[in-house]
Image: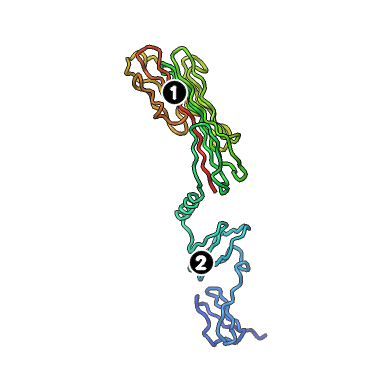
Amino acid sequence: MPRLKFKTSSSSGASPANGSLLQGEPAFNTGDGRVYAGNTSGNPTKMVGTAGAQDSNAVNFTGGSISVGSWSNSNVTVGNMNLGGTNISKMAGPNGGDSAAIITSAGAKQLVDDRMRQRLVSVQTFTGNGTYRKSGPEVKRVHVLVCGGGGGARAYSECGGGGGFAEGVFDATGMGDVTVTVGGGSGGGSYFGFSGQGGTTSFGGYISAAGGYGANQNSQHSGGHGGYGYGGQIQTHGGSGGSHNNMDQYSGSNASGGIGGGTYFGGCMAADRPNWGYTTNAAPGTGGVAIAPSHNGQGGRSGNAGICIVYEYK
């Protein structure tokens, strides 16, 4: 039986010479798996199908470039893609924009950071009651942080607890004006009494944080425990205030006092002189401190007011 004979080569990269093929005559290179056919001039033309027609998991791109005109919402899954030649020439992602090269991990982080900075519209901070109003219609999401007020202190190192904390991201597309309430710090006082709980901070009905408890509020000689957050994606307790300690009262007027409970935003400095409460230097929502007068049963300071912070994003 007669056998068909085709021009073949086993040398990878070799191709038939110009004019060596008849029109439509095939030629094969078994070294790199390429197929050629003669054109009207008898010159070899590579016969390449679409990537989808190749064997599964065995598609190698060893030269040229990949050009992607648009990116649809359909899923694209790539197992192993070998780009042995030049880089990807164009990629249009869901948010648009071209890339002339494969992005590195560091470049991806920088791109995300830059995009986020571009999308931040403004930051509004409330240290007292007020009303949140969107900066403009471009605001699509808000990131809200709330911290309750701190509990008040008493003498003998009996200090107030820190306000609770909550954090959440909310859709602001149809959001109107929102009432913001910032919890005040509970008042301090003298010995043998108790201080009340700090006020609750809230961002409308979306998210809130209760204030820290005052000294002796739960039991005599105890520091107040922290408040708690409600709503959003993150909720934490405030720190507990220091409990009864005779040393600050019996060691003289310069003895150290107690430390109020801390919050997400920081801690409360201890008082170390009879008339220094450090309330102005403490973080928002921290519990009141107990200063150290010389055994006269006085010295509890008020807790610090809470805070509400609203980050606006496009």
Measured along the vertical axis of the image, is residue 131 above or below residue 88?
Answer: above
* Left or right, 152 with reference to 203: left
Task: Identify which residue, 127 or 53, lies in the foreground.
Answer: 127
Q: Where is residue 197 in the image (x, y as percent from the top left)?
A: 52, 22
In front of the other: 45 or 7: 45
x and y percentages locating residue 289 in the rendered image: 42, 22
CA separation, marks 2 and 1?
62 Å
> Which quadrant, please, contains the N terminus?
bottom right
Is 195 placed above or below 84 here? Answer: above
* Amino acid type, callout 1: Gly
Is the residue marked by circle 1 packed among few (<14), some (14-19), or many (20+) residues within 10 Å?
many
- Name the foreground residue: 251 vs 177: 177
Number of callouts:
2
Which circle's residue, 2 or 1, is located before the other in the chain? 2
Horizontal and vertical percent for residue 75? 62, 57
Q: Which of marks 2 and 1 is in front?
A: 1
The residue carrying mark 2 is 89
- Residue at point 51%, 35% (across, down): 308
| Secondary element at image label 1 | loop
Badge 2: few (under 14), some or many (20 or more) residues near its Cα, within 10 Å?
Answer: some
Can the viewer see residue 164 in this picture?
A: no
Q: Do the residues labelled 2 and 1 touch (CB within 8 Å)?
A: no
**Location of residue 105 in the rendering, given as x and y in whole percent from the top left corner:** 47, 54
Q: Residue at x 51, y 84 (%)?
A: 17
Location of residue 73 by image quarter: bottom right
Above or below, comparing residue 146 to residue 84 in the picture:
above
Which mark identifies residue 2?
none
Would you name the residue on which mark 1 appears?
288
Quick one: SS at disc 2? loop
Residue 154 makes an appearance in the image: yes
Q: Amino acid under label 2?
A: Ser
